[in-house]
Every structure is written in structure tokens, then in C-alpha cells.
Image (spheres, rainbow, N blue to C red):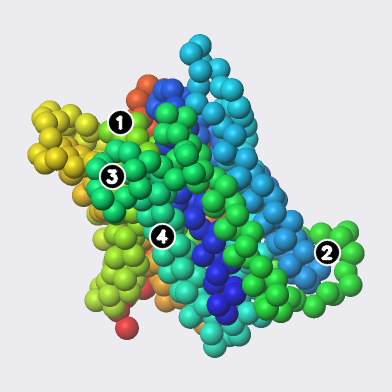
Amino acid sequence: MRAWALAQAVRDPYVILVTIYIFMPWFVRAVVGDPVQGQALAAQGGKWGGWAVMLTMPILGAMIDRLGPRKPALAVVIMAMAAITASLWWVMPARPGGHSAGLGVLWVITAGAVMTWLFSAHEMLHNSLLVPAAGYAGAARASGLGLAGGNAMSVGLLLLVLLAFALPGTVDWAWLPAAPLLGLDPALGEPARITGPIVGALMLVGSIPLFRFVPDQLRTGARLGSAFVGGAGDLWRLFRGARGNANPLLYLLARMIFTDGLTAILLFGGIYAAGTMGWGTLQMLGYGIVLSCAAVVGGLLAPRLDGWLGPRMALMLELLLLIAVQTLVLGSGAQRILFQPASAAPLWDGPMFTSLPELVFLGLGCGLAVTVTAAYASSRTLLTRLVPPDRLGAYFGLYALSGTATMWMGPLLVEQATRFGGTQASGFVPVIGLLATGLLLMLFVRGGGKI
């Protein structure tokens, strides 16, 4: 069980450190050089990866079920993820004239698209080993342990990068090194770039216990061709078995739409914060640590709301609050608060978050972290209240598909709206639209009340 959970705990820091808070915001600022163009490019990579997931992952998952063993494919996926993540060290800041000395913009956007597909493949293969690792009785405990471990590992790595590489040389604190460890040069973005090799190495080492101690599924002896045909048939039966019950299907449609909005906020929230507030790696490290802790609060709050209100009303409340907070975020910036001009004068002498607009933006970011996490948790609980217990397997299969089938939609809308509006804020307007549309559909979903 612990080996299975550890494999997730060492995978999730890629999202937190590389995608959301550290590497990608630095890349947009220092390599692309234009936060609006950078946000559009990052969204383009997410769109490509989402298309690949939509076209391949459902049938690949069904084929794996027919073939049996997961570990050989999972080993290839992990090695590819580690190699691509480590390669980010060779992404260099732009030189005068806009050219990069190392791996450039095209590599990062392509790598982001490939990592979207690999991350989804890892999730599918890793999740399918949950029962062999923990048994049916321990599955819920192992699942929670993996999620908690991923958050804890991410906060630990953020603190490591902050204290070892970002803060040294910027503040005169006796307990800190006088200069960044390993001789890293902030002018070359090395404190941000080092997150790639750190996350890649951790991913490799932390996955070893899974391959040593978690039993694999037995080989069925099926050939690839027969596995493909049989897997396609399994998918058809999955859809056919869910027909005739419009209420949970309406919920899955609503979830498919609002999950695209949740995913877009996760993927591009860090890029938006760095560009809008003008924050560098130091500030983004602090931002990531605070918001990761706030996300834990969201995970703890969701079960309480589910019990007080029922998961349907809890989810609707979480989506409504998320729409409100995201709207306020779009009206805040380095010199404005809630759509009103504000002074950026420092309120105190510190390394980060010294002005009132920065503190307000940090608080709104915590609101986003709490509501996004709570919405993910309540949405999973709600499905268990809407379908008969003997149909949970089929509907959770559709639940998984609803989270991946249109995961390209959020990045596509962010890309197009950013290019059309010419600002980072304009790129998030359709994200609010996705959340609102999902919330509107939730009004017509029946059930999911208190028990």
C-alpha cells in the first residue's frame, strides 16, 4: 500500500513545481518574454496533449485490461517522464535578440504536450494497480495516502528550493546560506530550472518500491490485435450499460464541462499570477507553498460540507464560490484590488508579498486553492449517491472518461481567448463560462442530498 502511495507522491510534484508554480511561470517570463504570448503557448501545448489523451487513452486502458500486466508499460512511462522533466534544465533564458542558447520554446511546448499524455497514462496504469497493492478493504486508505503524500512531497520540495536556492543571497538571515547552494545563478534562472532534474530524479527513485513490492496483474496471453478488438467492445458495453438513466449521465455531462474549468485554473493559474503580479521565482515559491497548504484545507473541508449539505449542494456552493473568487482574481493585479486602482507601496520590509495588492492576490489565490480542491472531492462523492451500488463500476468508468474526453477544451479556450483579447485576464473569461455552464446543468441533477 505504501509503495503504491509513494509512486503517486513522487509523481504529483511535477504538476505543482513544474507546471503551476515554478518552471512554467519562469519560462513564460524569461524565455518567451511576454506573459500573454506565453500563456497562449502553454495553453496550446495543453490542447495538443488533451487531444492525444482523448483519442488514445480510453482504448489503451481497455487494452491493458485485456493484456494483464501493467508494470512493463508503467516503467516505460516513468522513464520517459523523468527524462523529459530532467531535460528542462537545458532550457535557457532568452539572449538579446530573443534567441535561447539551449532548448527553446518549441521544445518546452512539445514536452508539455507529451507530458500531458504521459501523466494521464501513468494515472491510468498506476490506478489499475490499486487493488493489487492494497486490496479492496485498503483501497480508500491507499488512495487518500497517495493524495496526501503528493501534497506533502510538493510542499517539502517547494521549501527545499526556496531555502536552498531562491532565498540565499536575497535576505541577510544568519540561518540561511550566504549564496544559493550548488553555485546556482539566479540570473540564468537556475533555481527554477533545477526543479526539472529534482522532480525527474525523485520520480525514478520513488517508483522503485512499487516495482519491488506491488504485485502485478497476471498475463492473459492475449495478443495486441485481439486486445484492441476486445477493448473496443468493452468500451461499447460500458456506454451501453449506462444508457437508460438520464440523471447520472446529466451529472457526468455537467462534470465534464466544469472539470475543464477546474483543470484550466490549475494549469494556468501560476502563469497568470506570475505575469499579472510580475513575480519572480522567489515569490512564486512562496505563493506555491501557501496555496498548497490551502489546498489541504479544501480537501478536509469538502467531506464536512458533503455531510452538512449533501454532496450536490456542496458541489454547487463550491462552484459558485469558485466563480466569484476567480472573477475577483481577474480584477486584481500589482496595482489594483478588485477592479480598483491601489498603491503598490510596501507595507512592511520583507522578501515577498509586501504590498496590499500582493496580499489581497495571495488571499484570493488561497480561496481558489480551497474551492478547486473541495470541488474535485465533492464531485467524486456525488456520483456514489446518484447511481445504484451495483452499477458503480460502469459509472466510474464513464466518470474517468468525462475527466479526459474534453480535457483539451479548457486549454483551447484559454489559448484562443488570450490571443483574441490580448491580455492574460481575457484568457480566463471562458474558464468562468465553463464553471457557470457546469453549475447551471447541476440545477437539473436530482438526488445527492444528505443521508
Query: Foreground mark, 3 or 2?
Result: 3
Q: Residue furthest top?
A: 97
Q: Which mark is residue 278?
A: 1
Label 2 secondary element? helix
Residue 217 at what x, y percent from top left?
Answer: 75, 76
Q: Residue at x 71, y 79 (%)?
A: 215
**Are the residues tagged 1 and 4 within 8 Å (C-beta)?**
no
Query: Foreground mark, 3 or 1?
Result: 1
Label 4 secondary element? helix
Q: Separation of disc 4 and disc 3 at Cα?
A: 27 Å
Q: Separation of disc 1 and disc 4 at Cα?
A: 25 Å
Query: Foreground mark, 4 or 3?
Result: 4
Label 1 secondary element? loop
Q: Separation of disc 1 and disc 2 at Cα?
A: 51 Å
Residue 119 at what x, y percent from top left?
Answer: 60, 53
> Which residue is denoted by mark 4 in the rendering?
156
Query: Foreground mark, 1 or 2?
Result: 1
Count neighbours of disc 4 (C-alpha within 10 A) and say few if under 14, some if 14 to 19, many if 20 or more: some
Q: Is residue 448 left or right of residue 340?
A: right
> Which residue is denoted by mark 2 in the rendering?
227
Q: Earlier in the sequence, mark 4 or mark 3?
A: 4
161 and 73: which one is in front? 161
Question: Looking at the rendering, which quadrant does residue 214 occupy?
Answer: bottom right
184 and 382: which one is in front? 184
Q: Earlier in the sequence, mark 3 or mark 2?
A: 2
